[in-house]
Amino acid sequence: MGIAYEKDIVAWANEQASFIRAGRFELLDLEHIAEEIEDVGKSEQRELSSRMVVLLAHLLKWQFQPARRGVSWKATISAQRQDIAFALKETPSLKTRLANDEWIAVAWAKAVALAIDETGLESFPEVLPWSVTDVLKGGWMPE
């Protein structure tokens, strides 16, 4: 056929795009194209998860280390909220993740692990003590 998917994914992707533009649909590697399209969605979900974990970890640090609060933590919290809001605006279907208890539980567990690693503290709540709405609300901070 053409360039092997396994050998050079960038060259393969460019070749597949050229086949589509030329109307040469019979040359398309449909199985790998389908996998790549699915991976785009997974990538967006991973990005949302990563941002939520960082946001939650910083909110934990804010609440449990009040003496260390500073501009840097506030900036990180604000930046994560803005990036999450942008991701949700650009990809509205991601909002279902925020309403999924299992997804939130996994994000929370990762955030707690990150906060433990960064603070040395180990006495964090086992479940998310705040509403997702509050977590994402600009200006809201746990006390």
Image (cartoon, rainbow, N blue to C red):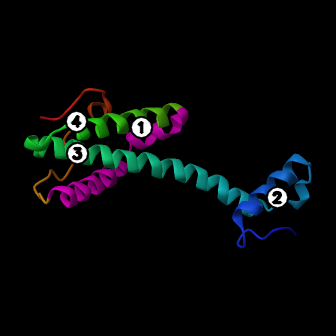
| First along the sequence among labels 1 and 4 | 4
Element type at marker 3?
A: loop
**Amino acid at circle 3:** Leu
Element type at marker 4?
A: helix
What mark, if any, has residue 15 been given in the picture?
A: 2
Q: Give me the C-alpha separation between circle 2 and circle 3.
A: 46 Å
Residue 104 position within the rendered picture, expressed as x and y whole percent measured from the top left: 33, 47
Closer to the eye: label 3 or 1: 1
- For this view, does 74 lie left or right of residue 22? left
Q: Residue furthest left?
A: 67
Pick the residue in front: 115 or 73: 73
**Amino acid at circle 2:** Glu
Asked whether 114 falls inside the magenta stretch, the response is yes
What mark, if any, has residue 128 been given in the picture?
A: 3
Closer to the eye: label 4 or 2: 4
- Quarter of the N terminus within the rendering: bottom right
What mark, if any, has residue 71 been given in the picture?
A: 4
| First along the sequence among labels 2 and 1 | 2
Asked whether 125 falls inside the magenta stretch, the response is no
Labelled pair 1, 4 in contact (Cβ < 8 Å): no
**Amino acid at circle 4:** Val
The segment highlighted magenta reads: 90-119
